[in-house]
Amino acid sequence: AQSVTQPDIHITVSEGASLELRCNYSYGATPYLFWYVQSPGQGLQLLLKYFSGDTLVQGIKGFEAEFKRSQSSFNLRKPSVHWSDAAEYFCVGKANTGTASKLTFGTGTRLQVTL
Amino acid sequence: GAVVSQHPSWVICKSGTSVKIECRSLDFQATTMFWYRQFPKQSLMLMATSNEGSKATYEQGVEKDKFLINHASLTLSTLTVTSAHPEDSSFYICSANHIAKNIQYFGAGTRLSVL
């Protein structure tokens, strides 16, 4: 069965510190992978995506993620966190079979930023 | 580009009444849209897949007679919560599938409170 796992439910980092949010996937074939961010009471905003090619992908707001096939991981990173980054982050997978296939969501990681 | 508008953002209704939520893709056509439900501090749960010009596909456990979905055009899908009850109170989020980009773009969500 297809699944996406985010091991960390809640992470707290200090402003200016580096950040890494973990994500592992389980698919029969390499899926398409996404990171979305959700601010309180709002919908989801796409941070970045991986379809194929370069395994280090750059996104918006200074985020990047690295696809590692050997570890079935797609961790999100940011070198220096800002207070405005406090939000819920979802790692999302999609089977690479058809453009309208369903998304599989991780459980989310809530990021808290201390000043 | 790739904006999805969801309306209303917040609605309060009396028990037993019906509520309609609209989801529009503003600058692209979407033959497929999705409706999700999100409980507090949880991930998104897919309710149904909305296909333009055909019947929606509901996920297991979702009552199709309670959650009516209509996708009458390439830019509009509606979700009607019929005979709403307090247990239907939740955050409902739609997404539209951008075929060319192979990405789902999300609306900002609708918070439904049933009194």
Image (cartoon, coloured by chain):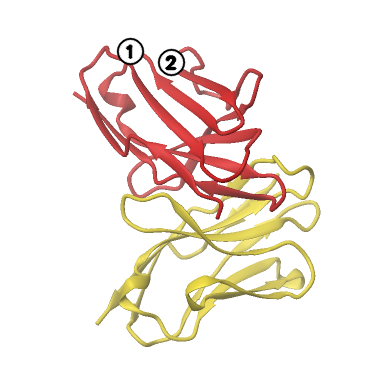
User: Hey, which residue is sitting farthest front in the picture?
Assistant: B27
Which label's residue is closer to the chain start, 1 or 2?
Answer: 2
Q: Nearer the viewer, residue B19 or B113?
A: B19
Disc 1 is placed on an element classified as loop
- In x, y percent, where is residue B69? 51, 21
Q: Nearer the viewer, residue A109 or A33?
A: A33
Left or right of B103 in this view: B65: left
Say which residue label 2 marks: B66
Which corner quadrant of the image does residue B29 belong to? top right
Numbered disc 1: what chain? B
- In x, y percent, where is residue B40? 32, 45
Rendering colour (chain A): yellow
Give the residue drawn at x 44%, y 42%.
Answer: B5
Callout 2, which amino acid?
A: Lys
> On the same chain: label 1 and label 2?
yes
Chain letter tied to red: B
Numbered disc 2: what chain? B
Say which residue label 1 marks: B83
Q: Nearer the viewer, residue A37 or B40?
A: A37
Left or right of A97 in this view: B62: left
Give the residue drawn at x 18%, y 23%.
Answer: B115
Q: Nearer the viewer, residue A68 or B30?
A: B30
Asked if A82 appears above or below A53 in the picture, the reply is below
- In x, y percent, where is residue B82? 37, 15
- In x, y percent, where is residue B21? 39, 28
Disc 2 is placed on an element classified as loop
Callout 1, which amino acid?
A: Ser
Separation of marks 1 and 2 at Cα, in angstroms: 7 Å
The answer to whether mark 1 and mark 2 are in CB contact below 8 A is yes
